[in-house]
Amino acid sequence: MDNYDTIAAVSTPIGEGGIGIVRISGPEALDTALKLFTIKGNVAAVEERRMYYGTVFDPGEKKAIDDGFMVFMKGPRSYTGADVVEIHCHGGTLVLKKTLEAAVKGGARMAGPGEFTRQAFLNGKLDLAQAEAVIDLIRARTEASLQAARGRLDGAFSRRVGEIKEALLDLLVNLEAELDFPEDEVEGLMSEAIEQGLAEAGGRIERLLATYEEGRAIKDGVRVLILGRPNVGKSSLLNILLKQERAIVTPHPGTTRDVIEEVINLRGVPIRLMDTAGLRDTDDHVESIGVRLARERIETAELILLVIDVSSGSFDEDMGILKSIENKKVIVAANKIDLVPGRLDVEGAFGGQKVMFISALGSTGIEELKDAIYEESTGRPYGAGLDAPPGELVATVRQRDALAKALEGVWRAGTALKEGLPREFIATDLRHSVDRLGEITGETTTEDILDRIFSGFCIGK
C-alpha cells in the first residue's frame, strides 16, 4: 500500500454539466470525505463500492453546498491502488469549486497534474507505458488512435518490450554466473549461442523501432501545410479534404489572408490541415501578413502539400518555393489537370518529388492524394499489413529513445563478442540494454522522467 499524501481534485471537465466528480485518494481518503459529506439515513459503516446519498457541506462553516452521492473504493482495488472516494454532485463550476475546497479543509491537499495516475504507477497498478496510454486514451481523436491507446493501456506494448528484456536477461544471467563463479562447474554459453541471442534481440528491437513513425502519427497526428502560389487551388483542396466550404474560394488571387486550420480523420490518422495565403511579393499590407504567417508555419509543419497549377504552363515560381523548403517532406499536388489535355512532365520538372495529379474542382485524384499523405505521414503504404497490432506500436519519443539506446547496447555487445573481448564487456553492454528497456515500463527510471511524463496530464487524472 502507499505512503503518500491524501490528494483531491475535480475529475470532470470544467464547465456546466449534469454531474461533476471530486476525487479524493490516499490513506485518509474516507476520513476526509466524511468530514464534508453527511450520509442520509442510519449507516453503521461505509461499505466499499456502494453509492450513498447525502449532503455535501463546508466542514468549516457547516453550510450545505449540494446534495449528491459518495462512493468508497478501498485500496488496492481502486484506480490509484490507494483508498479512493468520489463525491458525485451537480456539475456546476461553483459547486465543484466549493466541494473541492471542502475536501482541502477536511485534510486533503490539491492534486497536481496526473497525480492520481502517478499514484497508480507507484502502487503497481500500471507500469509507465500504460500510464502514458491513459492520457493518450483521453486525447484520442480517431478510432485508430483510440484502439492503439486502449491496447497500450491493456499492456500489449509493455508485454512486447518485456519479452525482449527477458531474452536479454537470460543471456546476462548466464554470463554473470560464468563470471562470478569461474572456479565452479558453471557451464558457460557458447559464443554462437550468445551471437544468436543478440541477433534475435536486436532484430526484435529494430522491428519495434520501425513502428515509431506510424505509432506517433496515429497518437499525435500530423501537421500538414497547404502551400503554393496564389490562385493555384489551395483553398479548394482544403474544402474538398474537409468535405465542407471552410475557405472562401474566388477566381481572384490573394483571397486567403490568414492561416485556416482544421483537423480531419485521414485513414485513422488525425491530420491538422493548414491552408495559407499564396506566397508572392505584395504591396497589400493585410495579404503580406498572411504571407509572413504562411512562411512561419513552414517551420512547424511535418508535411507540406505544395499545390501547383499544371495549366499555368510554367513552374519557375513553384520551383522557387520548393527550394525554400528543402528540409521538409513534400508532396506536389499537381492541380487543375481537368484544364490540360494531357499530363505534363511534372515529375521531371520537380526532380523526383512525389507528385499526385488532382483536380480539386472535379474531385479527381483526391483519394490517391489521401493515400499519399498517409504514407508520407506514417512511413507505410495505406492498406499494408501492420507489423504489429496498434497497441504494440512505439508511440512516444521517450519510448523510441530508450529502445534506440537498448539497441546500441546490443550492438556493442555483439562487437565485443566478435572482437574476442573479455565477457565482462559483453555483460556490461547487456546490463545497459536491460536497464534501458526497463525505463520504458518504469522499472528503472528517475523522478525527473516521472515529473516530465505526468506534468503533461490534466489535473484530476
Image (cartoon, rainbow, N blue to C red):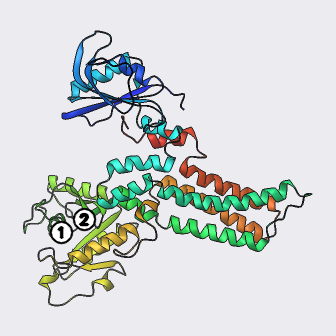
Q: Is residue 11 above or below residue 209?
A: above
Q: Amino acid at mark 2?
A: Ile
Give the secondary structure at mark 1: helix
For the point 80% across and 62% down, which residue is it?
423
Q: Are marks 2 and 1 in contact (CB under 8 Å)?
A: yes
Q: Which residue is mark 1?
A: 237
Residue 441, horizontal then vertical, whole percent: 54, 50
- Residue 341 appears in the picture as rendered: yes
Residue 111 lies, in percent from the top left, at 41, 29
Residue extending furthest toward the bottom? 342
437 lies left or right of 84: right
**Residue 300 visible in the snapshot:** no
Tell me the number on the disc at residue 226.
2
The mark nearer the N terminus, 2 or 1, is 2
Q: Which x, y percent locates residue 33? A: 36, 21
Where residue 213 sits, quadrant-wise, is: bottom left
User: Which one is in front, 215 or 176?
Assistant: 176
Q: What amino acid is labelled 1 in the image?
A: Leu
Residue drawn where x is 49% and y is 36% of the image: 76
* Mark 2 to mark 1 CA distance (whole Å): 8 Å
